[in-house]
Amino acid sequence: MARDFTSVGVVGLGTMGAGIVEVFARNGVDVVAVEVSEDALERGRAILTGSTDRAVAKGKLAEADRDALLSRVRFAVGLDALHSVDLVIEAVPEHLDLKQRIFAELDRVCKPEAILATNTSSLSVTEISVATSRPNQVIGIHFFNPAPVMKLVEVVRTVVTSADVVADVEGLCKRLGKVDVTISDRAGFIANALLFGYLNHAVGMFESHYATREDIDAAMKLGCGLPMGPLALMDLIGVDTAYEILDTMYRRGGRDRRHAPVPLIKQMVTAGLLGRKSGRGFYTYERPGSPVVVPDEQTPVTADAALGDGTRAGGESAGPAAVSKIGIVGSGTMATGIIEVFAKAGYEVVSVTRGAEKSAKVFEAVKTSLNKGVVRGKLSEADRDAALGRINWSATLEHLADVDLVVEAVVEELSVKKALFASLDEICKPGVVLATTTSSLPVIDVAMATQRPADVVGLHFFNPAPLMPLVEVVETIRTSAETTATARAVCAALGKTGVVCGDRSGFIVNALLFPYLNDAVKMLEASYSTADDIDHAMKLGCGYPMGPFELLDVVGLDVALAIQRELYLELREPGFAPAPLLEHLVTAGYLGRKSGRGFRDHTRR
Ligand SMILES: NC(=O)c1ccc[n+]([C@@H]2O[C@H](COP(=O)([O-])OP(=O)(O)OC[C@H]3O[C@@H](n4cnc5c(N)ncnc54)[C@H](O)[C@@H]3O)[C@@H](O)[C@H]2O)c1
């Protein structure tokens, strides 16, 4: 007969434990909440009351329900209070010896039929289980942060966990309103195995001054639709907890260098910069435990102030140049979208294509897209006509002689782009910003085709350009501060967020996104889980808008493979080697939605 879990114990009331207590108590289960000292108990109680008070204030929980919830929780110091519970969930810091000690003690204290569960993110549930005399009743129940909000629970069975224990815990998760995926005991399970290489990489970008914390986070939020950027997420997880998870994953997960914690993380832990819980991590918070970010010495001055100032350390001019007339070269998807974006924002545009036929096609495409805006009530007919009227159509580069900014969006071939930039160098007036939209070529190669590399910058728009709010502004080692300031000011004038980054393969977004997608393919290839469960885990555990396989099918497997190859070739990181399964699918013509089949068969839906 299935166990009914009328009372549970939670050990450790930190970031996770306090949230797990709330999940159970909200669902009518009596909870014994245990900490190591009276002080820690008070901290845990404060997290729980803070969270439930916020839920009441937001109208998500009635006051009476909050009181009933809190009345179900009994707080205690020491494990002895857990003698009669049906299930214990341990959520103490991520140290194997500590967890093993606690499990040995729980084994002694708890009734023989009680299930003992760990919320570990990366340690071996099997190794924890053997500290008890009942490893068949030990299981991983991995909640996601914040536990009351995130729907996913990873249920981790070891080789000795009894089938009835697994089934009962799965039933319990459903009763808690969670979606569970059951998996075996591997470092990082599904979600963290895919998440932490990405987080560590993002910290590495920040540590090496590749981009600012705000720009890294904005890039992933706006470029990928993630609920928060990686550095804000590190602060939510807890920098100390993240360190321990990375360290364990490095040791357990085949010593993948991508999991070796970036040195800055250890330094932050030593300095007590633990994230939200200590009031300061990558960002500074109103007070310990608060989610509200307050300005600190790294906060950029507002765009207006920065642009008005016009100087940088050393007295170098960094103010943006005035830009009103734009040249756009190309006639593909990106060029078409970018023409629309500039014309709609009020710029005078000179579109240069390879002939009248191409120009006519682009004109039709821009008109169709603007018409959609009119139909949806987002654009008046007069504004549409004005935008179209601002575009001058040309088949010769000579017409770019008096523009203030050129955006190149021609085919992704270095020789073609270099030849074009050499011509622009001859034609354009001095001081003009020359921008390339390349997504994979080094911007410096293009810049050096001109006599004015200081004026060359990358402007990496995302597809579809009229909709995507992000532009990566790519600085080469020769780009001047003024060029970058101008490019950023133009992005702002377009209503987009320009994030500045260095000239490395994948810039910010692709460099962080594609290795994660590639890792998901490797996980599938290793038969650790199914595409459906992996997609579920990332959507419900981490709040991603799409799972990795859904996204790969949309992006195109061939595109993903090409980007991953570039990253691998430039960075020589063994973990970036494209997954063989990805290569095979591309060879077989399974490219995703566009070919009808990728990881899923789209012809039958
Ligand atoms: N932070 C996350 O986002 C996250 C997500 C999922 C799982 N986890 C896992 O959950 C576990 C807890 O992580 P956290 O981030 O909540 O850590 P935390 O540091 O915020 O909290 C740990 C708590 O355990 C308490 N504790 C320490 N020793 C104890 C003992 N002997 N008895 C009782 N309590 C004790 C501490 O006082 C502290 O309150 C870890 O295994 C972690 O990997 C964390």
Image: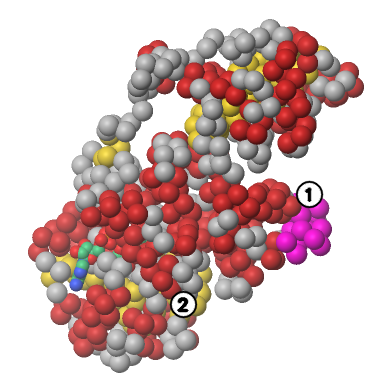
| Left or right of 200 on screen, residue 508 | right
65 above or below 444?
below
Q: Residue at x 28, y 64 (%)?
A: 17
Q: Residue at x 78, y 32 (%)?
A: 416
Name the secondary structure under disc 1.
Answer: helix
Give residue 48's quadrant in the image. Answer: bottom left
Outermost residue, top side: 402
**Towards the viewer: 450 or 85:** 450
Q: Residue at x 47, y 59 (%)?
A: 258
Could you say where residue 495 lies in the image, as x and y percent from the top left? 54, 23
Mark on residue 185? 2
Outermost residue, left side: 38
Segment tinted magenta in the rendering: 583-598
Local packing at callout 1 (Cα closer than 10 Å; few below 14, some 14-19, many 20+) is: some
Residue behind mark 1: 594
Q: Earlier in the sequence, mark 2 or mark 1?
A: 2
All told, the count of numbered labels is 2
**Towards the viewer: 493 or 596:** 493
**Towards the viewer: 299 or 146:** 299
Q: Quadrant of the C terminus?
A: bottom right
42 above or below 427?
below
